[in-house]
Image (cartoon, helix red, strand yellow):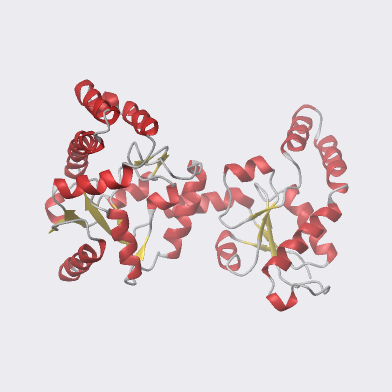
């Protein structure tokens, strides 16, 4: 069967059934890739560098010869690696079979050039059914960036720090509502303390790839998001989508200060004292010298609650300022009075309020 070229839109549909093979170098893949794609590098990072230098300083023909030297010894290994991937995806009853598994594969490189063409040829020659992404990963990235300029039907869960907004988001999901957990995608809880206890954040490009996939998945649905500043740790919510978020209804969970303080203290109070101090130091310019000294001093004296009391006052002021920067806030804001941090009860109130305001 001939190799079939496909568009990014076709890739997104086919990738739900067939594996995507990213033949770029390991470094390119680790930086960012199509979510769910398998790394099947044609060249390692050093080999790619050698070929690129040869192309620029010698000639295209010389670079191709270097490429063939590197490619030739890898052909069998690459075929066997694809067979392993396909066997891992096959039904249980066929995994021990010696018969070749006939699942099509999707191949791409950076621009849909020689790397993906070479691997696609090899796999097709061996007998695999192969789809080749037109324009490669670059084409996919153009699609990603386009998703942030579209309009979406979404609602925002607002509330001061310590209101349990993430828990509310997940409770909404349990109740059958569609959500996008921006902090979950970013591996960060949003504040100066948000990285503590979390996996390493993805690169900005990978964050965008993951978010674009979610937006595409829910493009015809209404979904819920947690109110965020544009920056989540080291990552930024893309401008176009951020602008859209700022025009959407905000369902603001208004919970008393002391209740939120108890929630924050129980959530962060068990973390390493040194990590907490380092996090406070990172915001000392915004927090202020007196408040920084009081917060760190309280922590050193094991008065964790008083430390977080200082920090919560700071985050409340910051959130109020960000909230009021929205245009048309009087129309967008739906305030919901809640007596405590109870995800189940407060979710019911959000759903009721949203139903009334729909």
Question: Can the viewer see residue 328?
Answer: no
Eyeballing the image, is 171 above or below 27? Answer: below
Question: Can the viewer see residue 323?
Answer: yes
Q: Residue at x 74, y 37 (%)?
A: 48
Eyeballing the image, is 255 above or below 293? Answer: below
User: Most extreme residue toward the bottom, as rendered?
Assistant: 93
Q: Position of residue 15 (x, y in %)?
A: 60, 65
Of residue 203 and residue 105, the one placed in the foreground of this image is: 203
Of residue 107 and residue 2, the one placed in the foreground of this image is: 107
For residue 124, side relative to residue 307 (left or right)? right
Q: Residue at x 17, y 50 (%)?
A: 259
Q: Residue at x 21, y 47 (%)?
A: 262
Q: Position of residue 211 (x, y in %)?
A: 44, 53
Eyeballing the image, is 93 above or below 250? Answer: below
User: Most extreme residue toward the top, as rendered?
Assistant: 289
Q: Position of residue 344 (x, y in %)?
A: 25, 65
For residue 99, side relative to residue 282 (left or right)? right
Quarter of the image with the C terminus is bottom left
The answer to which image quadrant residue 43 occupies is: top right
The answer to which image quadrant residue 180 occupies is: bottom left
Of residue 158 and residue 259, the one placed in the foreground of this image is: 259
């Amino acid at each position: 069967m001939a190799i079939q070229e496909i568009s990014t839109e076709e890739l997104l549909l086919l990738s739900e059934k067939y594996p995507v093979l990213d033949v770029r170098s390991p470094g390119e893949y680790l930086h960012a890739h199509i979510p769910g794609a398998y790394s099947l590098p044609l060249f390692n990072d050093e080999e790619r560098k050698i070929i690129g230098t040869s192309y620029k300083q010698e000639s295209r023909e010389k670079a191709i010869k270097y490429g063939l030297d590197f490619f030739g010894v890898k052909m069998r290994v690459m075929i066997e690696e694809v067979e392993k991937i396909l066997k891992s995806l096959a039904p249980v009853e066929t995994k021990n079979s010696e018969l070749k598994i006939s699942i099509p594969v999707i191949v791409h490189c950076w621009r849909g050039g020689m790397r993906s063409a070479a691997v696609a040829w090899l796999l097709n020659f061996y007998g695999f059914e192969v789809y080749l992404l037109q324009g490669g990963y670059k084409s996919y990235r153009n699609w990603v960036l386009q998703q942030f300029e579209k309009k979406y039907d979404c609602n925002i869960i607002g509330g001061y720090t310590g209101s349990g907004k993430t828990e509310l988001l997940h409770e909404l999901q349990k109740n059958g509502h569609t959500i996008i957990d921006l902090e979950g995608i970013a591996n960060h809880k949003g504040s100066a303390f948000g990285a503590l206890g979390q996996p390493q954040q993805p690169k900005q490009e990978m964050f965008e790839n993951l978010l674009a996939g979610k937006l595409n998945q829910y493009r015809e649905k209404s979904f819920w998001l947690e109110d965020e500043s544009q920056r989540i740790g080291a990552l930024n919510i893309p401008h176009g989508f951020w602008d859209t978020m700022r025009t959407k209804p905000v369902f603001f969970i208004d919970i008393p200060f002391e209740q939120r303080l108890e929630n924050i203290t129980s959530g962060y109070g068990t973390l390493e004292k040194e990590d907490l101090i380092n996090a406070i130091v990172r915001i000392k310019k915004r927090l202020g010298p007196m408040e920084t000294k009081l917060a760190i001093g309280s922590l050193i004296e094991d008065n964790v609650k008083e430390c977080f009391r200082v920090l919560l006052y700071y985050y409340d002021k910051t959130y109020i300022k960000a909230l009021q920067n929205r245009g048309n806030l009087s129309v967008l804001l739906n305030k919901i009075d809640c007596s405590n941090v109870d995800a189940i009860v407060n979710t019911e109130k959000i759903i009721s309020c949203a139903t009334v305001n729909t």
